[in-house]
């Protein structure tokens, strides 16, 4: 048995999801004629309480389109030092959009509105780089799946409004924040100008993310998506997997969260520090643990010299979790 805890991206489509894909009605989405893509966009826009939505192949593209709508070339986006947009998108905002970054330090990625107010430089004048937008991540991936405190999000949103700054949400795992807190998705998404959500993480779709925003911004994003070469034709085949995931795989995220807490507890970490499906362990030799665990069929991610990340998801059941605990316990105890 292989137990793959490297990421929730490793899930494979289930048989009923594959059946929904096979049965999907399709058309040419570049002509706006794929009914399944349109249904997915309509449904996600409604769920998140924004006017319109755009289906994109990846969360990175959802983020990049959102950011480019809010920041002009030569302006900056600010985010925390661990943010996916800053660390894990290969400098795409610089390469494609001429955007620079500055970052604030955040303990486990938790938002601190005061740090943001200190860092931001709106209207910096003719010689300095002006901040045009702020990016927030919820849940926070490299922060260990933490859910952003609502009062901090509200304070950041107030600051952004007062200073005319755009606000982007990298909501790759916003579903997890919703299930962990019971807060409606629309409430989590409301303060933001643009929101990107992933269907291919814990929701288990093979491909796909969605960007939501105002109708005007989404019309602009549609042009940029095509310009980047990501206009998709009979994409209803994959959008159907996303629709299936929205109907069947959201509330079950609670199981992933419970398993992540059990995993943390069994490995000597604090389960109270595991609000969703990501367990971060501080170990002496993360790469060494990953190699040894892999030899016993348990895959984990070493994301830093001491930083081990374990992610629960649709394809890890209780037996898999027990197996992972048996293999990892002696390795992380050393
Ligand atoms: C996975 C992820 C993304 C997008 O990743 P893709 O591999 O491009 O789909 C964006 N933000 C966060 C926080 C993520 O975890």
Image (tube, helix red, strand yellow):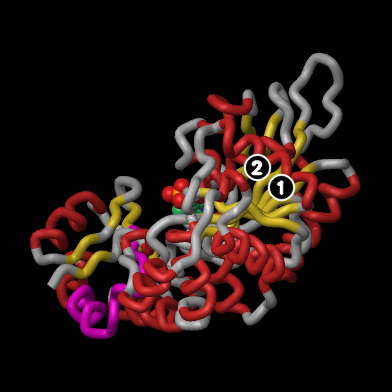
Left-right relation of 22 to 73: left
Q: Position of residue 265 (x, y in %)?
A: 35, 79
**The CB of the residue at mark 1 lies under 8 Å from ligand 1:** no
Q: Nearer the viewer, residue 81 or 6?
A: 6
Left-right relation of 173 to 262: right
Residues in magenta, as a range: 309-325
Q: Position of residue 262 (x, y in %)?
A: 35, 82
Q: Quadrant of the N terminus?
A: bottom left
Residue denoted by label 1: 218
Q: Position of residue 12 (x, y in %)?
A: 31, 66
Disc 1 crowd rating (10 Å Cα; few below 14, some 14-19, many 20+) is many
Question: Circle 1 sits in a helix, a strand or a loop, which is it?
Answer: helix
- The residue shown at (69%, 66%) is 48
In the orientation shown, which residue stands out farthest toward the top?
127
Left-right relation of 295 to 216: left
Q: Quadrant of the C terminus?
A: bottom left
Residue denoted by label 2: 222
Res. 39 in view: yes
Q: Nearer the viewer, residue 121 or 66?
A: 66
Q: Position of residue 123 (x, y in %)?
A: 86, 29
Vertical arrangement, residue 64 with respect to residue 324, above or below: above
- The residue shown at (73%, 44%) is 219
Asked if disc 2 and disc 1 are in contact, CB closer than 8 Å, the reply is yes
Q: Nearer the viewer, residue 9 or 218?
A: 218
**Residue 333, magenta (yes or no):** no
Number of marks in the rendered image: 2
Q: CA distance from mark 2 to mark 1?
A: 6 Å
């Amino acid at each position: 048995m292989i137990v793959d805890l490297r990421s929730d991206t490793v899930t494979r489509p289930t048989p009923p999801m594959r059946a929904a894909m096979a049965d999907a009605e399709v058309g040419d989405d570049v002509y706006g004629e794929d009914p399944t893509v349109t249904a997915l966009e309509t449904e996600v826009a409604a769920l998140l309480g924004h006017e319109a939505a755009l289906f994109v192949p990846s969360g990175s593209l959802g983020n990049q389109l959102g950011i480019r709508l809010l920041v002009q070339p030569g302006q900056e986006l600010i985010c925390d030092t661990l943010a996916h947009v800053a660390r894990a998108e290969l400098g795409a905002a610089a390469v494609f959009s001429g955007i620079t970054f500055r970052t604030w330090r955040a303990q486990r990625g938790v938002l601190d509105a005061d740090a943001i107010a200190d860092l931001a430089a709106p209207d910096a004048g003719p010689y300095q780089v002006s901040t045009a937008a702020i990016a927030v991540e919820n849940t926070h991936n490299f922060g260990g799946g933490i859910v952003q405190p609502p009062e901090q999000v509200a304070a950041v949103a107030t600051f952004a409004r007062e200073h005319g700054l755009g606000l982007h949400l990298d909501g790759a795992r916003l579903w997890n924040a919703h299930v962990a807190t019971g807060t409606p998705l629309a409430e989590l998404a409301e303060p933001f100008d643009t929101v990107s959500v992933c269907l291919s993480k814990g929701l288990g779709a093979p491909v796909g993310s969605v960007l939501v925003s105002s109708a005007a911004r989404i019309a602009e994003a549609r042009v940029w998506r095509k310009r980047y070469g990501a206009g998709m034709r009979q994409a209803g085949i994959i959008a159907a997997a996303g629709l299936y995931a929205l109907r069947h795989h959201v509330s079950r995220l609670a199981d992933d969260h419970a398993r992540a807490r059990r995993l943390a507890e069994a490995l000597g970490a604090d389960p109270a520090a595991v609000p969703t499906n990501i367990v971060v362990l501080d170990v002496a030799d993360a790469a060494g643990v990953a190699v040894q665990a892999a030899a016993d069929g348990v895959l984990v991610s070493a994301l830093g010299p001491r930083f081990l990340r374990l992610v629960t998801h649709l394809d890890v059941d209780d037996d898999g979790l027990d197996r992972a605990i048996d293999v990892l316990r002696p390795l992380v105890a050393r």
